[in-house]
Amino acid sequence: MTEYRKALAHEEADILDFINYVFSQAHQPHDFRRLIPKVYAHAGFFRYHYVAVQEGRIRGTVAVLPVEMPLASGDTLKIGYVGSVSAHPYDRGAGHMKQLMQLMLKEAQGKFDLLVLGGQRQRYQYFGFECAGARLRFTVNKNNVRHALGHVDCRMQLREITKNDDPVLDDIYALCSQKMMCCKRDRQRLLDIMHSWEGKLFALEDEKGLQGYLYAKDRDFLAEIGLVDESRMGELIKAYMLMTAAREVTVRVNPLNRVRAYYIKSFAEKWQLSDNQMLHVLSWQRTLEALMAVKADCQPLMDGRFVFEVEGAGSYAIEVKDHGVRVTETDDAPLMVMTAQKAVEFFFSPYTAMTVTSPMLKSWLPVPFGMYPADEF
């Protein structure tokens, strides 16, 4: 008989051994203590995990990492990031993932506003997840640097941060905390956060001191940047490519950060806007109200009212007036009735903004959501 439940403290070492084994069998060798030190290098990670246990042995796991996203409005979104989904290769088809996901979803109600994960689309659609969010990426190659940034003087130096006692980490933490839609981070684990998935953290310094930081995930992916002066973006990218001898890099930008996008687009080879993560919204009222308020802070939203129904979750009215956003439950007849997955796609996917014809909805959509890679599981 298989028992499906939350993990216990004494199972922590077994959990780590299990996921290392399963992912190493399916992919290349994995050492999660090294790959995700922000979670697995610290005692107590058992509390994030659900396990399938047979005769005292773990046969499957699903984990949910709780994160909080403070917003400029003063609101905070409670997010559960799902990861370490695994089943023993001898037990494939036994239904462990299905049982654990259903248990996790049941316990997530009332605890999180939404759940997030990265994975194969159809695999997680069975559990109410859908692709959403917006991911904006720019590609910069060595020819862009030579022709468009050849005149730029690189006064900025990049210094890799490898020790927890480096005093510059306090200033980097302060810059992180100021970023739009950046999740709350543990200062004591900041370096582990930036070292997860083999990332590297660089301090950006000149003769005046710290000018920002860079989180590079792989040599050619600049996943997160904090800059005191956005106009120095070209200088930073040129300095990084010269230092690493990279032929091409991808730079990730929050789509709402129009100033940064403006500077990078002026010299980048190309750009791409696509879906980001997969979402499962648990609280439509809190999620839409909080995130639409973020968009209202960045650009004008047309005044109006829109009533929709999510099957099995209720009907809601979105009201925008004088840049204020209010979302309430309602008994009014909905203009649209959608499944939860269709509603996620409708509100959060950048594709929707290209298909809706209502001027009001065009100003509202997509509702912004995206997590920095350093905040992901």
Image (tube, grey):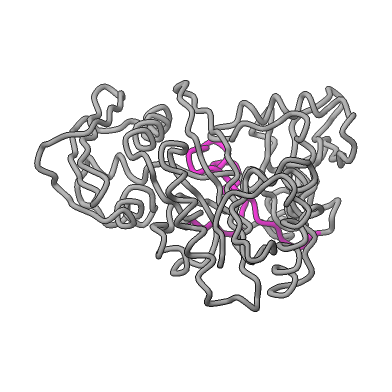
**Residue 204 image point, x, y percent:** 80, 35
Measured as percent of width and height from the top left, residue 149 is found at 72, 48
- The number of discs equals 0
Given residues 247 and 321, the one toward you in this image is 321
Q: Quadrant of the N terminus?
A: bottom right
Chain part drawn in magenta = 246-274
Question: 22 and 7: which one is in front?
Answer: 7
Q: Is residue 12 left or right of residue 101?
A: right
Q: Residue at x 83, y 31 (%)?
A: 205
Look at the image and say whether residue 256 sits in the magenta stretch: yes
- Residue in the picture at 81% in, 40% down: 202
Q: In the visual, does 226 lie left or right of 180? A: right
Q: Is 303 a magenta residue?
A: no
Q: In percent of the image, x 70 and y 57: which residue is there?
A: 249
Q: Is residue 38 above or below residue 102?
A: above
> In the image, is residue 223 above or below residue 154?
below
Residue 318's image quarter? top left
